[in-house]
Image (spheres, rainbow, N blue to C red):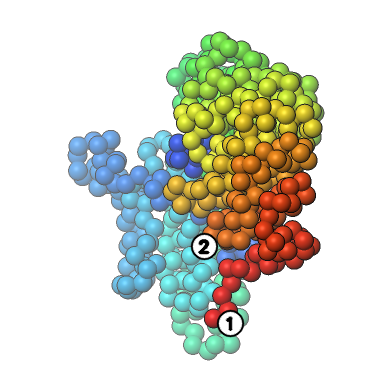
Amino acid sequence: MRRPPGNGEAAREGIGGWGLLGRQEARRLGCAGHGHCGQALLQIGINMMALPGGRHLDSIPLPGQRLHLMPADSVQRWMEDLKLMTECECMCVLQAKPISPEEDAQSDLILAGGPGPGDPLQLLLKRGWVISTELRRIAQKLAQDRWARVHSMSVRLTCHARSMVSEYSAISRSSSQEMGQIEKLLMEKCLELSAVTERCLQVENEHVLKSMKACVSETLSTLGQHFGQLLELALTREVQALVRKINASDNIYTMESTTGNLFSLTQEGAPLCRIIAKEGGVVALFKVCRQDSFRCLYPQALRTLASICCVEEGVHQLEKVDGVLCLADILTDDSHSEATRAEAAAVVAQVTSPHLPFTQHLGSFLESMEEIVTALVKLCQEASSGEVFLLASAALANITFFDTMACEMLLQLNAIRVLLEACSDKQRVDTPYTRDQIVTILANMSVLEQCASDIIQENGVQLIMGMLSEKPRSGTPAEVAACERVQQKAAVTLARLSRDPAVAREAVRLSCMSRLIELCRSPSERNSSDAVLVACLAALRRLAGVCPEGLLDSDFQQLVQPRLVDSFLLCSNMEESFV
């Protein structure tokens, strides 16, 4: 579960059960979920049409944001900017850069507000973003045979690559021989690309241009590979330095700054999370979480761990250092703040995610599962905010997929009562993302026969009925998808619980059949979701088997009597127009 929430990234699409919501996006919506990570700078491969960008424009500091940090001397400011601006601009002018109203001509990438002095990480990330974006754009223009643009962008790419190499060398520690070799190969390929694209401008024969295009494409691919290798080596060195600083320092301010930098790196994508895991980042962060003197840093360290554990290497490192036991200790210790326990729940949710196949082999989790589940139920019951409740319920939802014993534990802990009572508390449950977690737990628990009586006793059928009418408030794709998941899982829960005649009769009394028919016949009610349609048809057929008198003849003949696939095709075609 990534924060950005982003397990991501997420953005990172629901948490438990059938989808993972990116935590960063969830935070903006007033809740939380898993991380997502942005597109990775390191994934530059043979297919240059898929070259990644990795960062967003709004993460680049504007010139105005930087002025107040610089000395008042305007000449000095101008000289600072020259390092990042003039070389690219002069070269473009010398190559007769056209003035055109084209959209791409309006968005040339000039890094006016560069990274601060002595900040190699920001330099690598920002220059890496610019270069990877230029590579992708060159590939696009090459596919369109726009040779003038390809050449001018190639020249600019060479300038950016030279600036990155020279600036990083100036502020970094001693350079390795391997890095020096890759830097040399990168610059040679940049110069080769500029030269060959310049020759293409002079060629008019289409057959010759076609053969030269293949050469340019190959050079571009090789250049991308060298750039990816260089960036990975440089970032690995910086990660190693951060990890060493965490291991060696006992200063709380240094630790806070360093763990913050590490967390920022996890938001750049899965490749960087892999580097951090391989270079000992998980071990160092758990070392922080085991020292009482750093208690105030636990939330930040746990948030970073949740992001790293979106990759297999992170989960393996967590298991090697008995990370699950550490998480259990934090969750069960009431002396820790609610924020700390919520972040521990986020890590649990990430490492038990049903969408990550490598988490299913986390053997150490079973040993601590009972105390973790007990602590999570308590956290749900005492949560002071929607975010805390979401993190705890997400962890519970994922655990119900992780091991079937968890459902029996939840039943014994009266979790159904805790969850259903929370549904009436707008402070804890106020978004479809949270209801998605609750209905996921109910759907997985409903396979137990004892669950039905608890559901009826807590007025759960009426709440499930309400979830069949879940509607998005903002209309964003993430929220619409969450509402679809809530409707689908509510129908699945109802179908499973209706094995008990008492639940089926209660559902019929509450007009569940009418709502299910409406969802089947009206595509707009289910946002044209096939998954919701199938679940509603299954629930309707289960209820009709117990109380057939609640159906009209037309509904029975179209939605119940035929094969399920025939009813599905009939309902799914209702939105089509043959005019």
**Residue drawn where x is 40% and y is 51% of the image:** 57
Image quadrant containing the C terminus: bottom right
Local packing at callout 2 (Cα closer than 10 Å; few below 14, some 14-19, many 20+) is many
Task: Specify the amino acid type for callout 2.
Answer: Arg
In the rendering, at what x and y percent does residue 186 appear? 55, 56
Label annotation for residue 385? none
Which of marks 2 and 1 precedes in the sequence? 2
In the rendering, at what x and y percent does residue 246 appear? 55, 23
Q: Looking at the image, which is closer to me, 259 or 390?
A: 390
From the image, tell me which residue sits under label 2.
Answer: 136
Quadrant position of residue 463 = top right
From this viewpoint, is residue 150 visible? Answer: yes
Is 483 situated above or below 371?
below
In the rendering, at what x and y percent does residue 358 appear? 75, 39
From the image, tell me which residue sits under label 1.
Answer: 210
In the rendering, at what x and y percent does residue 232 appear? 59, 45
**Residue drawn where x is 73% and y is 32% of the image:** 452
Task: Specify the amino acid type for callout 1.
Answer: Lys
